[in-house]
Amino acid sequence: MAKKDSYDFIVTSFDRLYSAGFYSLPILDVYNRYAQSFFTLYPSYWPCNFVFQTLHKIMYEDLQTITFGLFLTGSFFFLFYGIGRNRDHFTFFVRYHAIQSVAVSILLGLYHTFFKFILYLQPEHGLLKSCFWEADTTIVSCLIITPMVLSAIIGIESDSLDLMKDIIPCWCMIAEKETPRKCR
């Protein structure tokens, strides 16, 4: 049994902020893919763009350049193997949010790939329909990720849409090579 493998530990402020930071990857991924369409259709939200532009420049331009384009791949392995499987040094709360951010990022990526493929197969939809779809996807993605970030800040493990109840134990089982109950 690992040292920090229980709920007896108090979730500290550092754990909360650290866990909320994991969600910067899926949030900036959504921003990277859909922001131009969103801010074109909804110009009143343009001041919000300045906050994301700085983070986007750091994570997608500067860090990608320094790491020879391997930052996002490295961040996946860091979150999944470095934190998700590290039962000795991280509490379940931190590991839960690390794995959940990886799962959300992968699901949003699959969604993007699948629907972009469908939109490009049907040219009669046109560019405007694609722009509306991307803007709506931005809104929906933010509505999905926001409760997760808030639950990390508040200090609870969220079960958004009951989808994570099924996905997280499977991810945990893969990471720990045990049954889902023993993952906690």
Image: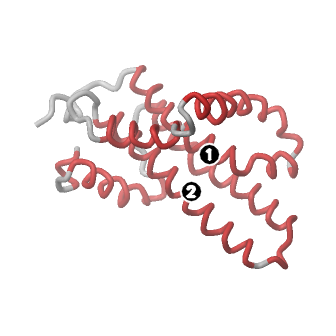
Q: Is residue 21 left or right of residue 77?
A: right
User: Picture coordinates of residue 169 (x, y %)?
Assistant: 30, 54
Looking at the image, residue 105 lies above or below residue 19: below
Q: Residue at x 36, y 43 (%)?
A: 80
In depth, the one of 19 and 152 nearer the eye is 19
Q: Secondary structure at mark 1?
A: helix
Q: Secondary structure at mark 2?
A: helix
User: Picture coordinates of residue 48 (x, y %)?
Assistant: 77, 34
Q: What residue is pinned by disc 1?
A: 29
- Quadrant of the drawing holding the C terminus: top left
Q: Residue at x 54, y 44 (%)?
A: 147
Are the two marked residues, 1 and 2, in contact with CB atoms closer than 8 angstroms? yes
User: Picture coordinates of residue 181 (x, y %)?
Assistant: 19, 52
Looking at the image, residue 138 lies above or below residue 91: below
Label 2 is placed on what type of residue?
Gly
Q: Residue at x 72, y 77 (%)?
A: 121
CA separation in Å, label 1 and label 2: 8 Å
Q: Is residue 3 left or right of residue 157?
A: left
Q: Is residue 87 left or right of residue 158?
A: left
Direction left: furthest residue: 1
First along the sequence among labels 1 and 2: 1
Q: Is residue 53 left or right of residue 155?
A: right
- Quadrant of the drawing holding the N terminus: top left
Q: What residue is pinned by disc 2?
A: 109
